[in-house]
Amino acid sequence: MKLVLIGIPGAGKSTQGNLLSRQFGVPYLSTGHIFRSIAKEKTTMGRYVKETMNSGLLIPDEETIPIVEEYLSRREYKKGYILDGFPRTLNQAKKFKNSLDKIIYIELPDKEALWRIAYRTEDVRDDQTVTAVMKRIEIFNEVTRPVIDHYEKKGKLIRIDGTKSIDDVNEEILKLLGKEFHENKVRSWSQKQKIILAVTGLPGSGKTEATTYFKKKKLPIVHFGNIINDLVEERGLDHVEDVHKTVRMEVREQHGMAAMAILSREKN
Ligand code: AMP
């Protein structure tokens, strides 16, 4: 499973990333962590990364892309990974060669993110000052939004409401990935209840065409209109609206307003 987490600072990406990593048994990799460790190096690159991060700005793509690709080429990431913080620009998304399964966008209003960060008491980082966080949110809105649109067009995006509790967000992510966590294991989610879909509309609106789709999926179709068609035919009458109306009234008088359902049940 190759997943990417996207969201503004404070949305809960690393919390969810670590949970998903344990649940799926694949490593969690955060580009923020990578850059924070580079920032500790007493080198020109280290100083440059530290300064860039502390002002809330992004490290240029030319540096970021090769670093991430080098990490992901390591053996431990072969089976899959949970990637947090990359791709963050459209250029990164387009140049990234790995085939991703899903991109999880944890949505959180800017204000809520600022509250969360302001009230964070543990591990307060240099890039988590209110000014730096505001800058990071601004960059997200300008630079990362196109990444979200890009993956949405490809049908790979999952949107999650990040205002909910950690457990609810996790459950929702798993659900939208078609999974559920049961007895300490992730398993594929299966539809347990039967679903009945009603296709309604005026004559000629395309009900038959719409139900053809479900026929292809081998779902049984109950066509209420066939009840009247068959009765008209059995009686050797013509298929004209007046005749259909009379037969319809007749069966309704006999069986009530649920006539079509009752007669369909008898037929099927
Ligand atoms: P994060 O912890 O993911 O918010 O990342 C912290 C900082 O690391 C960001 O504000 C950037 O300066 C840098 N960074 C992380 N990921 C990227 C990326 N994909 N592209 C550019 N800079 C990044």
Image (cartoon, rainbow, N blue to C red):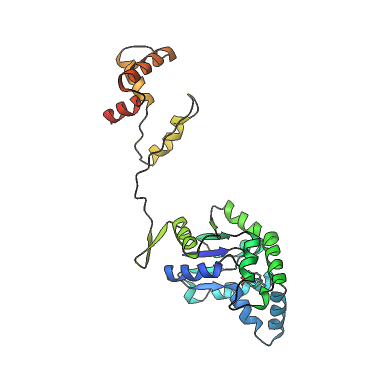
Outermost left residue: 266
Residue 84 in picture, x, y percent from top left: 56, 68
Position of residue 257 in the picture relative to residue 132 (left or right) = left
Residue 46 in picture, x, y percent from top left: 68, 83
The number of callouts visible is 0
Position of residue 132 in the picture relative to residue 230 (left or right) = right
Quadrant of residue 123 within the rendered picture: bottom right
In this view, the residue in front, 99 or 105, is 105
Instruction: State ligand 1's quadrant.
Output: bottom right
Residue at (47, 56) in percent of width and height:
176
Query: Vertically, is 93 above or below 260?
Result: below
Outermost bottom residue: 42
Query: Vertically, is 34 above or below 248?
Result: below
The C terminus lies in which quarter of the figure?
Answer: top left
Position of residue 39 in the picture relative to residue 266 (left or right) = right
Residue 162 in picture, x, y percent from top left: 55, 60
Residue at (37, 27) in percent of width and height:
224
Residue 165 in picture, x, y percent from top left: 50, 63
Question: Could you tell me if residue 55 is visible in this image?
Answer: yes
Question: Could you tell me if residue 57 is visible in this image?
Answer: no
Residue at (26, 28) in percent of width and height:
266
Query: Vertically, is 198 above or below 66?
Result: above
